Amino acid sequence: MIQILLVGTELPLLEGLAQSFAALGFSPVTAQSLQEARESAVHNPPLVAVVSRGLAAAGSAADALTIPLAPGGALVLFRAVGSPLVTLSPTVQRSVLADLTLPLERNRLLALVQHVGERAKAAGRGRQGEAGEGEATPPQ
């Protein structure tokens, strides 16, 4: 099962996203800080980390980039509607797959996560025990 890490302090928004991801068959995990996210991701790296833009800007320039990701994984930033737009370092700006306004772009986020999962499987970078395209599926 593909793990998605949701990081931020907007708990109702994160809970809604977690429910949406769970309904699609993903395994969402939430964290309220970048430190908590790193600790969670060390043991089970997520394929996609969805991080609050405010948290990414509040830490040092590359704090959000230190979250371990699964091979083929991606970092996505978000901000809640009505929250101020904060400036990010160029390093962080270049390293993210998308920068979304939630919940308005929730469907785009879900589509991006599905695409990253399909891309990782096609490249043979799925979780151990998951066969990607072109790999033999073990007999049942």
Image: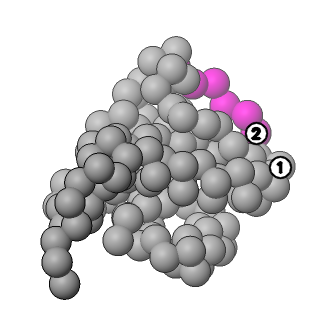
The answer to whether residue 135 shows anywhere in this view is yes
In this view, the residue in front, 39 or 70, is 70
Secondary structure category for the residue under label 1:
loop
For residue 4, what is the image quadrant? bottom left
The structure residue drawn at horizontal position 72% and vertical position 58%, both measured from the top left corner, is: 106
Residue at the spot of label 1: 82
Q: Specify the amino acid type for callout 1.
A: Gly
- Magenta stretch: includes residue 57: no
Q: Quadrant of the C terminus?
A: bottom left
Secondary structure category for the residue under label 2:
loop
Q: Specify the amino acid type for callout 2.
A: Pro
- Residue farthest along the bottom direction in this orientation: 140
- Magenta stretch: includes residue 86: yes
The overriding secondary structure of the stretch rendered in magenta is: loop
Residue at the spot of label 2: 84
The structure residue drawn at horizontal position 59% and vertical position 48%, both measured from the top left corner, is: 112
Provide residue 86's location: percent of width, then percent of height: 66, 31
Q: Is residue 66 above or below residue 113?
A: above
The structure residue drawn at horizontal position 46% and vertical position 26%, both measured from the top left corner, is: 95
Q: Tell me the crowding category of disc 2: few under 14, some 14 to 19, or many 20 or more residues within 10 angstroms, Cα based.
A: few
Where are the magenta residues, as a range?
A: 84-89
The structure residue drawn at horizontal position 49% and vertical position 76%, both measured from the top left corner, is: 25
For residue 103, what is the image quadrant? bottom right
Provide residue 78's location: percent of width, then percent of height: 63, 46
